[in-house]
Structure formats: C-alpha cells, structure tokens
Image: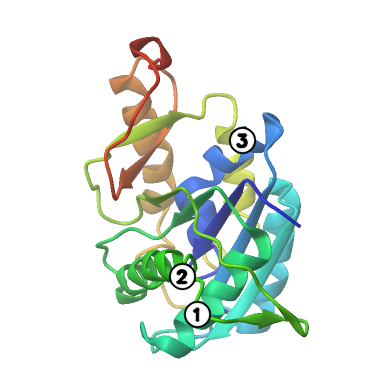
Amino acid sequence: MKLDILAFGAHPDDVELGCAGTILKEISLGKKVGIVDLTRGELGTRGTAEIRDKEARAAAKILGVLVRENLAMRDGFFINDEKHQTEIIKMIRKYKPEIVLCNAIDDRHIDHGKGSKLVSDSCFLSGLMKIETSFDGKKQDAWRPKVVYHYIQWKNIEPDFVVDITGFEEKKTEAILAYKTQFYDPDSKEPATPITSKNFLESLNYRAQDLGRLVGKDFAEGFTVERYLAVNSLGDLI
C-alpha cells in the first residue's frame, strides 16, 4: 500500500501530540496516512506496554489512519545504527510515502532527538539502490521521500512553517486523550509526570492557538524543515 504521508514517533502518543491536527486535515483532503511507532513506550511511568498498545489502536481509529505499526525498539535505549536504520528503511519502502513526519530534532526526552535523526538518516539511505532489503520474502525497491518534516514537542522550537488546523483541534484532543494512562486525570493514583499535569494538557491548546494567531488563523501546528521550502508562486501562501 502506497501512502502519501508516513508519520513516525519514538513513542505511542508522540504523533498525536505533535501533528494529529495536520494528519486529520490531510486525511480530510483525501490523503492516505499511516503511523509507525518506534517503541511501545514501556519505560513510561504510568501504564504498561500492553495498555499503550490498546491506547495507540484507539487513537489510530479516531484519527482515521490506514495503518499503524510498532517496531518494538527498546524504549530509551534504541540507537541510530545499521540494524535500526534497516527496520525504518523497510517501512519507508513498504509504504513509499511522499512526506515523512517525525520527532523534534531537539527535545526534552532523549528518544525524541534520537528518533528524529534515526528516521531522517533512514529516509536518505532508503533511496540507495545498493542497500538491499526484503519484506514478506519479497525484495524491496529503493524509495526516498520527497521531504522530511519535524513536528514540535516539549520545547517551543521556532517553526519554519505552520499548518492551519482550525476545525480539527477537538478531534486532535480526542486522539490524545485516548491515552488515558498518560495525561491529566485528577482521579489517578499513579505518580505524577511532566506530561500528566493539567498545565501540559492545556498548553497543547494554547500553543496551537498562539501559532494560529501569528498567521491569522484560530489553530495551527508548527514544523521544522531540513531544506528550503519552495512554492510555485506567492499565491500559494495563506
């Protein structure tokens, strides 16, 4: 199955937090979108890997993505080496996305920066014909996405561009809250973490509102790029 967009996250919920609004909008425009999680988030303070699996499936259903896969790399300990790159390359060649979305280049959680670099490097390597991979017993053709964009996570990184997600913000929140163990719950007896506070949950909304305000829209999500953005004409800008 060929996808238009393939979104990668170091952990289940990274994609929802960083770019769910954009995914929802692109799907509404007819784009085919999938998600690949690198780890099962097994080191998370709250919940278990098995619970996160269920939450990820629920979130995927809310978003309406066509596929969601988990590579089961070691949470906290995966590295950017040939073994892990090969697993990413197989996904890229399997789904042949034009656009790849992935973690922030620099962030509070060490897996985010590692995951960002791992996916970005693998996108380049995936285009090299002399790197041979196979999936389900069949040799895969080389494939390199046209662009790699990095969504914004914990740190308020200055975006290179923003996507107007007005009208999709409530559905984005619904997808995030599918991870019931991970975010604000005043009745939870589990230990508090930086992302379980009410402030963190509310910050997702006011960040989107602020990015939207700066471009004359109600809500927006920001991304950073690896190469110059190009438009056919000035009229392409909103």
Mark 3 element type: helix
Which residue is the site of mark 1?
Answer: 131
Which tag, 2 or 3, sits closer to the chain's start? 3
The correct choice, above or below, for 115 with respect to 197 in the image is below
Q: Is residue 216 left or right of residue 176?
A: left
How packed is label 2: few (under 14 Cα within 10 Å), some, or many (20 or more)?
A: few
Q: Are the residues flagged by discs 2 and 1 in contact, CB closer than 8 Å?
A: yes
Q: Nearer the viewer, residue 163 or 131?
A: 131
Mark 2 element type: loop
Mark 1 element type: loop
Under mark 3, the amino acid is Glu
How packed is label 1: few (under 14 Cα within 10 Å), some, or many (20 or more)?
A: few
Which residue is the site of mark 3?
Answer: 26
What residue is shown at x 45% (from left), y 50% (from top)?
Answer: 18
Under mark 1, the amino acid is Ile
What residue is shown at x 43% (from left), y 38% (from top)?
Answer: 205
Under mark 2, the amino acid is Leu
How far across and how far down the image is residue 155, in percent? Answer: 25, 54
How far across and how far down the image is residue 202, in percent? Answer: 41, 43
Task: Find residue 193 and report its image quarter.
Answer: bottom left
What is the total number of numbered labels drawn onto the structure image? 3
- Residue at the front extreme of this rendering: 130
What residue is shown at x 71% (from left), y 53% (from top)?
Answer: 2
Which residue is the site of mark 2?
Answer: 128
| Picture quarter with the N terminus | bottom right
Q: Nearer the viewer, residue 106 or 168?
A: 106
How far across and how far down the image is residue 94, in percent? Answer: 67, 67
Instruction: Look at the image and tell me whether residue 194 can be seen.
Output: yes
